[in-house]
Image: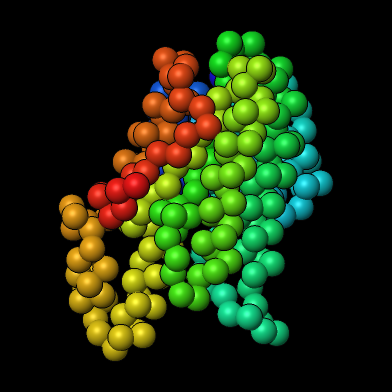
């Protein structure tokens, strides 16, 4: 069974690839940086079974090119995205963030859907990686919050639209996860408050009931369940994995 994983070169995407490879899937690793994708591939079980293909998900033509010669897909893990702040003005990152996180994910799914429909499994899977910030407002993060909230609407709409094709579509909203992006966020928090990074971590974890970040592997294991053949009832759902930071 073939599964495409976007943003597979680092962080959560890399961990997802590692877990799915252990479960015996053949992976198409997608991302902008070939070196990072190849580093991920080198870590995977049966690495020769997996492929690295570069694309920028903001460019629909690049996505289609990256999927050339793929006969079918059992699943897609739409993980690619960018973070950071934005401020209205000449240097506003609004379009960069929205075009990547929301439009890029939409374009990726649309490019993959014909291949997913070709797969013979009775139920196919799409997992969209959103964020806890889809449910929260954070000053200075309007583009990121909006893009991640948009992914939840996209999940519900597409789940309803493609249920008749046996395509189950769900979203995950991770909270703090120990990735390079999170560490950069902590450093920015520390710099803004003029405190150490360790102190920033303690401050950031105060509202989190379990008082910790998740590891990327935890998110990856949840993804592995959602794409498994045994999972045939979840669709259009958002699952929160955030150590209790938000209890909707």
Residue 120: quarter of image: top right
Left or right: 37 as drawn, with respect to 45: right
Left or right: 104 as drawn, with respect to 237: right
Q: How many marks?
A: 0
* Quadrant location, the N terminus: top right
| Residue found 50% across the figure and 45% down from its top | 129
Residue sitting farthest toward the right: 61
Say if residue 114 shows up in the picture: yes
| Residue found 20% across the figure and 76% down from its top | 199
Q: Nearer the viewer, residue 146 or 96?
A: 146
Residue 101: quarter of image: bottom right
Considering only vertical position in the picture, is 6 above or below 3?
A: below
Residue sitting farthest toward the bottom: 194
What colouring style does the render use? rainbow
Considering only vertical position in the picture, is 22 above or below 139?
A: above
Say if residue 26 shows up in the picture: no
Q: Position of residue 234 (x, y in %)?
A: 46, 25
Q: Nearer the viewer, residue 15 or 235?
A: 235
Considering only vertical position in the picture, is 145 above or below 233?
A: below
Left or right: 219 as drawn, with respect to 114: left
Q: Position of residue 119 (x, y in %)?
A: 66, 16
Q: Nearer the viewer, residue 67 or 78?
A: 78
Q: Position of residue 196 (x, y in %)?
A: 24, 81
Considering only vertical position in the picture, is 133 above or below 215?
A: below
Left or right: 88 as drawn, with respect to 13: right
| Residue found 67% across the figure and 38% down from its top | 109
| Residue found 61% across the figure and 17% down from its top | 166
């Amino acid at each position: 069974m073939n599964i495409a994983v976007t943003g597979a070169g680092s962080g959560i995407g890399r961990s997802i690839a590692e877990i799915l490879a252990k479960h015996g899937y053949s992976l198409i690793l997608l991302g902008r940086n070939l070196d990072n994708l190849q580093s991920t591939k080198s870590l995977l079980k049966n690495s020769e079974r997996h492929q690295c293909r570069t694309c920028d998900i903001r460019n629909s033509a690049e996505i289609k090119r990256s999927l050339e010669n793929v006969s079918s897909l059992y699943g897609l893990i739409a993980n690619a995205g960018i973070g950071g702040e934005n401020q209205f003005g000449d240097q506003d990152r609004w379009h960069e963030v929205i075009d990547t996180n929301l439009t890029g994910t939409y374009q990726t799914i649309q490019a993959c859907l014909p291949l997913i429909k070709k797969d013979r499994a009775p139920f196919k899977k799409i997992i969209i990686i959103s964020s806890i910030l889809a449910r929260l407002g954070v000053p200075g993060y309007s583009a990121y919050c909006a893009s991640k909230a948009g992914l939840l609407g996209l999940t519900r709409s597409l789940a309803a639209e493609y249920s008749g094709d046996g395509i189950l579509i769900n979203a995950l909203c991770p909270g703090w996860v120990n990735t390079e992006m999170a560490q950069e966020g902590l450093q920015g928090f520390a710099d803004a408050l003029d405190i150490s990074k360790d102190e920033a971590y303690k401050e950031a974890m105060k509202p989190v009931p379990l008082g910790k970040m998740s590891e990327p592997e935890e998110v990856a294991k949840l993804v592995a369940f959602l794409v498994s053949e045994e999972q045939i009832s979840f669709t259009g759902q958002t699952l929160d994995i955030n150590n209790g930071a938000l209890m909707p």
